[in-house]
């Protein structure tokens, strides 16, 4: 991407932001800095790791593929042959949906491989600016990332690349996460950004930390590491569990907070 094209792109994004002049200047500066970092970033840094890729086997019928699409929430799935390193193509939700609409019987007769489109492979060392150009030229939104030994290292999407430049992109299907959702008498699902102080007020206990302000930050600090799905810790009579993570960086979205029953103090017995 040429320097002029990069700043033209910034202008288009910036034009869509309805912000005041002070915020505009800060946002524009952030984007310019992002462009500088973007030119030095390689594909490996933004790809979805192999272990987190949702795939569909080549022999799976289209009905099974549709179930996988609905379960995973993705609109494109790599189709695997013998193993994950054997990618035979990419299956698109819109292609399966077309078959479902026009010829429902074929959903059980055709396989994922029958409908798969050709996959594009890129080395993990490829600069993002070159990857973006290639994706634009080929009109593709997904590529399989290959490591130095020829194995599948992960995959990268157009959204991953753009988000590296302009930040997280939310669409109309992204659900707004409520601050607090009561699941049971003693169990709450809490937005990771929810104020620790406000959680204390809600539970009528004193919750304070000099270093963090949010529930997610409190869990992260207590764990001493970035929370992974299912990570759990007990602190201040509360059981905190990493409930939902998302995105390339596995950002913590919600935390389950269970109020633990305090043990009754044991009565001291004395010998008569």
Image: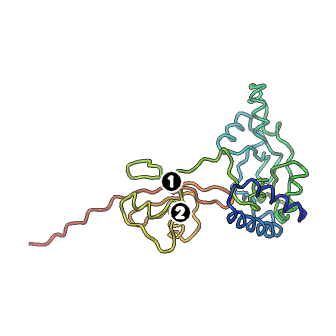
Determine the residue positioned at 38% across, 58% down: 203
Foreground mark, 1 or 2, reads 1
Tell me if mark 2 has few (under 14), some (14-19) or many (20+) residues whose alpha carbon lies within 10 angstroms of its own.
many
Q: Are marks 1 and 2 in contact (CB under 8 Å)?
A: no
Residue 244: x percent and y percent? 57, 54
Q: Is residue 100 above or below residue 196?
A: above
- The residue depicted at 45 percent of the width and 52 percent of the height is 188
Q: Secondary structure at mark 1?
A: loop
Q: Which mark is residue 90?
A: none
Q: Quadrant of the N terminus?
A: bottom right
Q: Position of residue 138 (x, y in %)?
A: 90, 50
Q: Is residue 28 left or right of residue 224?
A: right
User: Can residue 47 be seen here?
Assistant: yes
The residue at the point 82 percent across, 70 percent down is 40
Of mark 1 and mark 2, the one earlier in the sequence is 1
Task: Bin the neighbour count of mark 1 within 10 Å (Cα to Cα): few under 14, some 14-19, many 20 and up.
Answer: some
Which residue in the structure is indicated by mark 2?
216
Q: Residue furthest bottom?
A: 210
* Number of marks in picture: 2
Q: Position of residue 199 (x, y in %)?
A: 44, 60
Image-based side of 204 in relation to 19, left or right:
left
> Residue 266: horizontal and vertical position, in percent?
23, 66
| SS under mark 2 | helix
Task: Return the residue nearer the eye: 95 or 134.
Answer: 134
Q: Is residue 155 visible?
A: no
* 66, 127: nearer the viewer: 127
**Looking at the image, is 13 positioned above or below residue 55?**
below
Q: Which residue is mark 1?
A: 179
Q: Residue at x 39, y 60 (%)?
A: 201
């Amino acid at each position: 991407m040429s320097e002029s094209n990069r700043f033209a792109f910034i202008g288009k994004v910036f034009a869509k932001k309805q912000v005041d002049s002070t915020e505009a200047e800060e946002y524009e500066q952030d984007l310019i800095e992002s462009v500088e970092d973007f030119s030095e970033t390689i594909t490996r840094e933004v790809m979805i790791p192999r272990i987190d890729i949702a795939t569909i086997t080549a022999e799976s019928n289209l009905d099974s593929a549709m179930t996988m699409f609905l379960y995973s929430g993705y609109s494109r799935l790599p189709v695997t042959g013998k193993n994950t390193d054997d990618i035979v193509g990419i299956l698109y939700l819109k292609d399966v949906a077309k078959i479902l609409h026009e010829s429902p019987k074929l959903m059980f007769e055709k396989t994922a491989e029958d409908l798969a489109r050709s996959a594009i492979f890129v080395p993990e060392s490829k600069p993002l600016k070159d990857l973006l150009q290639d994706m634009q030229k080929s009109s593709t939104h997904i590529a399989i990332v290959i490591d130095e030994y020829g194995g599948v290292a992960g995959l990268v999407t157009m959204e991953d690349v753009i988000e590296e430049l302009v930040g997280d992109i939310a669409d109309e299907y992204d659900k707004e996460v409520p601050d607090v959702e009561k699941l049971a008498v003693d169990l709450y699902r809490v937005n990771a950004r929810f104020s620790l102080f406000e959680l204390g007020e809600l539970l009528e206990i004193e919750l304070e930390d000099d270093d963090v302000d949010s529930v997610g930050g409190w869990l992260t600090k207590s764990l001493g590491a970035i929370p992974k799905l299912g990570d759990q810790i007990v602190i201040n009579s509360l059981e905190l569990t990493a409930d939902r993570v998302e995105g390339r960086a596995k950002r913590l979205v919600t935390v389950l907070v269970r109020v633990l029953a305090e043990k009754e103090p044991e009565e001291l017995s004395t010998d008569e």
